[in-house]
């Protein structure tokens, strides 16, 4: 009986370690800028259009301008 309990316990422990885990990913926090400053420049990088000011590149979206890495 003791070996039976040990075998069942080992079987259950092995099955618990192989269970799938659910990982939820949150969307990145994005700051949207509604209007572009007057001193901005339009630049093309790798065939894509970006808006450049204050040393940063922004991409135009429907909501406004979003900071991107180029």
Image (cartoon, rainbow, N blue to C red):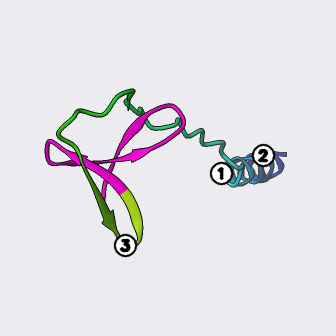
Q: Earlier in the sequence, mark 2 or mark 1?
A: 2
What are the residue bounds of the magenta stretch?
Answer: 50-70
Instruction: Name the residue beneath numbered marker 1.
Output: 17
Closest to the observer: 9 or 41? 41
Dot 1: element = helix
Q: Is residue 28 magenta?
A: no
Instruction: Name the residue beneath numbered marker 2.
Output: 2
Dot 2: element = helix
In this rendering, the answer to whether 45 lies above or below 23 is: below
Magenta region, main secondary structure: strand
Identify the residue at image location x=41%, y=33%: 30
- Marks 2 and 1, how far apart at CA: 23 Å
**Spot occupied by residue 63 in the image (x, y as percentages of width and height):** 51, 31
Q: Nearer the viewer, mark 3 or mark 2?
A: 3
Q: Is residue 62 magenta?
A: yes
Give me the disc on residue 46.
3
Tell me if 16 is positioned left or right of 43 in this view: right
């Amino acid at each position: 009986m003791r070996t039976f309990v040990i075998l069942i316990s080992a079987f259950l422990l092995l099955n618990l370690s192989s269970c799938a885990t659910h990982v939820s990913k949150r969307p990145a926090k994005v700051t949207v800028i509604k209007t572009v400053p007057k001193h901005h420049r339009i630049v093309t990088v790798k065939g894509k259009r970006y808006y450049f000011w204050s040393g940063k590149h922004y991409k135009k979206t429907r909501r406004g301008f979003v900071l991107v890495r180029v």
